[in-house]
Each structure stands twice: as C-alpha cells, then as structure tokens.
Image (cartoon, rainbow, N blue to C red):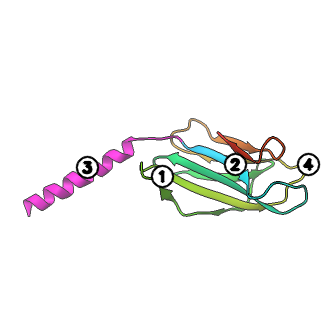
Amino acid sequence: MARFVTLVLLGLLSLSGLDAVQRPPKVQVYSRHPAENGKPNYLNCYVSGFHPPQIEIDLLKNGEKMEVEQSDLSFSKDWSFYLLVHAEFTPNAVDQYSCRVKHVTLTEPKIVKWGKFSSSFLSC
C-alpha cells in the first residue's frame, strides 16, 4: 500500500511540473476558400503550440466579436495544445477581420489581421 501511495504521489508531482512549461501561441488566420467580395465563406483562426491550455480566442469584424464555433481542445505529441475557431463571413472591400488571442504567456492580446489581397493565409 505504501508503495502504491508513493507511486501516485510521484505521478502527481511529475504532472504538476508540466504547468511550469509555458509556450506562447502561434496564430494563423485564413479563409476556407479564396476570398471573393460578396461571396459567403468561412474565416478560420488556428491557434497552436501553446501551454498551459487556458486560452481565449475571438474572431473580430471591425473590432467587434463575431459569433464563432470552436473545435475541441487537442494536444500534440509535445503536450502543446491547439484549437480552431471559425465563423461564417462575407468578405467585402470595407470590413476588416482579425483574430485576437489572450494567453498567460502574452503581456497583451495578440491580434492577427486577415487580408484577402496580400494573402488568404497569415500567421504570427
């Protein structure tokens, strides 16, 4: 019994050490299909490589939060996490879209803009 308790305690201690490794998120913003003015599409914000798993991700239209859907939180072989947030949108010449990420490793929110003319795939 004492051996079992010791093994459980060692296991818990090793898991608690995982929280000490903090990794900042990588943010990628892109449309599902090539953007065309007036044609409905999906805007994606893929956030990866972060630890710990607590994170806040918003898609913004002209600085205002959009209604989004979010994938389940998943992790990679290196125990870093990733998420996909997406929303329906219709690109035009006026509206500006971006992804805002808040994470403990960031001193301020990271904002990555989507640009249909420079590229449909931007990362930071």
- C-alpha distance separating marks 3 and 4: 54 Å
First reached walking from the N terminus: tag 2 or tag 3? 3
Is 87 on the left-hand or right-hand side of 37?
left
* Range covered by the magenta-colored residues: 1-24
At mark 2, the secondary structure is strand
Nearer the observer, 88 or 13: 88
In magenta segment, residue 9: yes
- How many residues crowd mark 1 within 10 Å: few (<14), some (14–19), many (20+)? many
- C-alpha distance separating marks 2 and 1: 20 Å
At mark 3, the secondary structure is helix
Residue located 91% across and 59% down the image: 38
First reached walking from the N terminus: tag 1 or tag 3? 3
At mark 4, the secondary structure is loop
Looking at the magenta stretch, what is its main secondary structure? helix
Q: Amino acid at mark 2?
A: Val
Q: Amino acid at mark 4?
A: Ala
Q: Which residue is mark 4?
A: 93
In magenta segment, residue 22: yes
Q: Which residue is mark 2?
A: 29
First reached walking from the N terminus: tag 2 or tag 4? 2
- C-alpha distance separating marks 1 and 3: 18 Å
Is 71 on the left-hand or right-hand side of 115?
left
Q: Which residue is mark 3?
A: 13
